[in-house]
Amino acid sequence: MTIRHATPADLSAIAALEAACFPPNEAASFETLRTRLAVYPTHFWLLYDDNGILVSFADGMTTHHPELTDEMYGQPNLHTEEGVWQMIFGLNTHPHHRRQGYASFLMNHILKETRMQGRAGVVLTCKEELIPFYKALGFACEGVSASVHGGVVWYDMRITF
C-alpha cells in the first residue's frame, strides 16, 4: 500500500471516490473538492493498493478553532496551515474495498503525521454506526454534533495528542 498527498491531477479520481462513498446530500461536489485541493493539497491523503488502485482517501483543513463546523466544509479559506487542529471532512473507502483495513491504515498514518507536525489533535464527525471504529483508533465521542450537514445526525469525535 502507498499513501501520498494529492495533486490537481487527482481531482477526478477523488471526486469519483467521494461520490461512491456518500449519498449526494452528504458528498462534497466536484467544485468543492477542486477548491479544497487548490488551498490545502497536503491535507488530502490518498491510499493506493498494491495494484495502484485508489481505494481510500481523507481530506480536511487545519484551524485553531477546536470544533468542526458546517461552514468549514464549503469555505476552504478558513484553513490556517499553522492551525493546531486537523479537521477530517471524510474518510472515504470504496465500497468494494471496505472491511479490509484500508481506512484504519490510512487514519493511523494521518494521526502519526498530524502528531509529528505538533498539532493538538484530530477532529471529525461520523454517523452513529462508525463510533466504535473511531473509538478503536483512539478517538473519544463527544456526543451529538451541532452539524446539520446533509440533513443527518452526526457525532463529534476527537483525539487529542
Image (tube, rainbow, N blue to C red):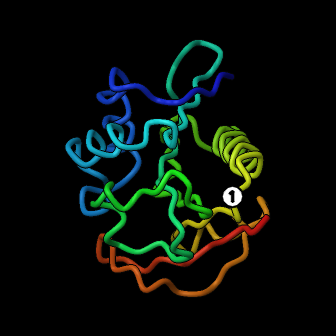
Query: Which secondary structure lies at badge 1?
Result: loop
The quarter holding residue 160 reads: bottom right
Q: Residue at x 66, y 40 (%)?
A: 106
Q: Residue at x 59, y 67 (%)?
A: 123
Residue 139 in the image: state x and y as whole percent.
73, 68
Return the residue at label 1: 119
Instruction: Name above or below for residue 147 compared with residue 56.
Output: below
Q: Residue at x 32, y 30 (%)?
A: 11
Task: Specify the amino acid type for callout 1.
Answer: Arg
Q: In the displayed structure, does residue 69 sit left or right of residue 28?
A: right
Residue 43 in the image: state x and y as whole percent.
51, 43
Q: In the displayed structure, does residue 154 sit left or right of residue 101?
A: left
Instruction: Name above or below for residue 65 compared with residue 122.
Output: below
Residue 2 in the image: state x and y as whole percent.
65, 22
Residue 137 in the image: state x and y as whole percent.
77, 59
Q: Quadrant of the N terminus?
A: top right
Instruction: Name above or below for residue 25 compared with residue 6.
Output: below
Residue at the far front in the pictured view: 82
Q: Residue at x 28, y 60 (%)?
A: 74
